[in-house]
């Protein structure tokens, strides 16, 4: 795909649209928008950064970009893990950071309407002041923006009970790649009028439209929450217990998993200690509900099953301090690994839950055979793991080659187990070349046709999700 460079004339027109102070061109500014949380080697500079405030400004930018055939990469907080916000073809980075207002908390309809640049944690706290609850607790909740959560269909620990972001998205205002403003969905709980374009936009990774308003459905905050940290001597036993718990129909909000490399890294990073951190694996389980008795009863059932099933101990985090300590440890694993290793590739596989034992065994075996240390952590209750190949010794070239061989084999295995290559981080830039390993040509061609219908010139976030060329 051929794009044109951003000329001085284009920059002048962008300044007319959003105001001079919201158009950035200095090399330091451009460098700040060249990467998200993907690995450093994917860094790619934009030619200009624009920070619009309204959908009308965005529509004008998109019309200009279309006329000039300039690529546009939308960006929320830049906390994504698959390179969705990296401007691979240069061009314009369209940052939504100024669109950061909570527009309405509608208590009667139990909905909140926000702009895309609101920080997730701020929105969660704001709705809680009205007695409402937004349950999707993405690990980066204190820095990520809700617009990015919708674009990536972000998950997080409580997806097991509450689903992914998309499950809570009911209305969207979107600027199309050709510069129209459209409103999709709304505050209607049920609506089957036509194709579900709201859910098409959810998880489209900024390739089909730019999200400018979101209406989320809310629920009631559970009154009682119990968090349990459970060490196991054997990783296989820990994983097998997850299946057992799910089959027992103990309704849990989250079952998280951390292997010993992950636990040791995060202990060092946060300068803290978790109980029995020498153990091979830890589970972190959350139980929530409206009735104290029911929550404790579920907790006891978990305790008895796991103690019988090989747990070393079951630790109860029942106050704010201990709860924060264990969850912080879980949430900061990725940051810890990044701090201690030169090469870190955070993966995001998913398998049917009945296959998690096999998946973990295969990853261990792969890691030994390829001699690549691979900490594993993640949302095991959903069958979603973050195996993270890491390394300090290899040079860039050797690492690229070895990692590629490792990943291809891992994705093939995962596919054979009925799984796929990303559950919540997105295909982005990082996994686009592996898509044919898990998807048929027909499926990819259908996606390309959808992309073409929304974005005939292919200027919105090119190089992400699906290959631009029509013949795979
Ligand atoms: C997590 O599970 O912690 C997040 O998906 C991603 C991360 O920061 O690794
Ligand atoms: Zn995750």
Image (spheres, helix red, strand yellow):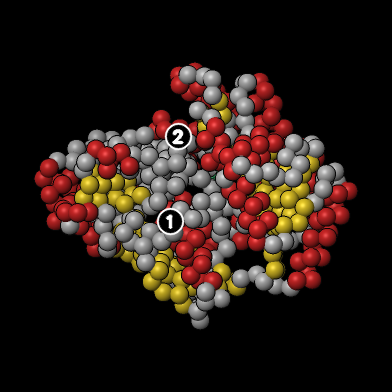
Return the disc, 1 or 2, that comes first in the chain's sequence.
Answer: 2
Q: Is residue 342 left or right of residue 373?
A: left
Q: Position of residue 404 (x, y in %)?
A: 52, 25
Q: Is residue 118 above or below residue 338?
A: below
| Residue 470 appears in the figure | no
Q: Position of residue 303 (x, y in %)?
A: 83, 55
In the picture as drawn, the residue positioned furthest to the bottom comes out as 108
Label 2: which secondary element: loop
Local packing at callout 2 (Cα closer than 10 Å; few below 14, some 14-19, many 20+) is some
Residue at 70% over, 68% down = 224
Residue at 65% over, 26% down = 366
In contact (CB < 8 Å): disc 1 and disc 2: no
The quarter of the rendered structure image containing the C terminus is top left
In front here: 432 or 439?
432
Q: Position of residue 186 (x, y in %)?
A: 43, 71
Local packing at callout 1 (Cα closer than 10 Å; few below 14, some 14-19, many 20+) is many
| Residue 398 appears in the figure | yes
- Please identify the quarter of the rendering in which residue 417 is found: top right
In front here: 415 or 70?
70
| Residue behind mark 1 | 145
Residue at 49% over, 73% down = 111
| Residue behind mark 2 | 39
Q: Is residue 80 above or below residue 171?
A: above
């Amino acid at each position: 795909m051929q794009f044109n460079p951003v000329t001085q004339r284009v920059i002048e027109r962008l300044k007319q649209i959003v105001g001079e102070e919201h158009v950035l061109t200095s090399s330091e500014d451009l460098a700040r928008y060249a990467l998200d949380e993907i690995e450093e080697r994917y860094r790619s500079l934009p030619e200009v950064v624009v920070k619009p405030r309204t959908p009308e400004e965005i529509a004008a930018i998109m019309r200009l970009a279309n006329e000039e055939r300039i690529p546009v990469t939308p960006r929320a907080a830049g906390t994504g893990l698959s390179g969705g916000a990296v401007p691979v073809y240069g061009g314009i980075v369209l940052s939504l950071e100024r669109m950061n207002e909570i527009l309405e908390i509608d208590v009667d309809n139990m909905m909140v309407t926000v702009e895309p640049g609101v920080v997730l944690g701020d929105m969660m706290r704001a709705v809680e002041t009205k007695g409402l609850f937004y349950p999707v607790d993405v690990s980066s909740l204190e820095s990520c923006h809700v617009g990015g959560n919708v674009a990536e269909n972000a998950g997080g620990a409580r997806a097991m009970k509450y689903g992914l972001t998309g499950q809570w998205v009911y209305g969207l205002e979107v600027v199309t790649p050709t510069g129209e403003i459209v409103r999709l969905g709304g505050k209607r709980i049920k609506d089957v009028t036509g194709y579900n374009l709201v859910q098409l936009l959810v998880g489209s990774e900024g390739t089909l439209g730019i999200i400018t308003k979101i209406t989320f459905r809310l629920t009631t905050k559970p009154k009682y929450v119990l968090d349990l940290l459970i060490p196991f001597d054997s990783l296989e036993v820990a994983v097998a217990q997850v299946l057992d718990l799910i089959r027992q129909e103990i309704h849990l909000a989250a079952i998280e998993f951390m292997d010993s490399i992950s636990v040791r890294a995060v202990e060092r990073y946060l300068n803290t200690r978790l109980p029995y951190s020498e153990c091979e694996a830890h589970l972190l389980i959350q139980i929530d509900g409206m009735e104290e008795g029911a929550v404790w009863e579920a907790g006891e059932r978990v305790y008895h099953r796991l103690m019988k099933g090989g747990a070393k101990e079951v630790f109860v985090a029942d106050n704010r301090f201990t709860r924060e300590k264990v969850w912080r440890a879980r949430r900061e694993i990725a940051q810890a690994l990044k701090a201690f290793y030169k090469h870190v590739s955070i993966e995001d596989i998913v398998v049917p839950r009945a296959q998690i034992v096999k998946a973990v065994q295969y990853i261990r075996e792969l890691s030994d055979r390829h001699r690549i240390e691979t900490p594993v952590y993640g949302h095991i209750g959903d069958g979603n793991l973050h195996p993270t190949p890491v390394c300090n010794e290899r040079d860039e070239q050797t690492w690229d080659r070895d990692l590629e061989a490792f990943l291809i084999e891992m994705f093939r295995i995962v596919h054979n187990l009925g799984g796929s290559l990303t559950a919540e981080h997105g295909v982005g830039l990082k996994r686009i070349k592996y898509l044919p390993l898990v998807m048929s040509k027909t499926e990819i061609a259908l996606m390309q046709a959808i992309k073409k219908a929304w974005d005939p010139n292919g200027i919105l976030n090119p190089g992400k999700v699906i290959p631009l060329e029509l013949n795979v």
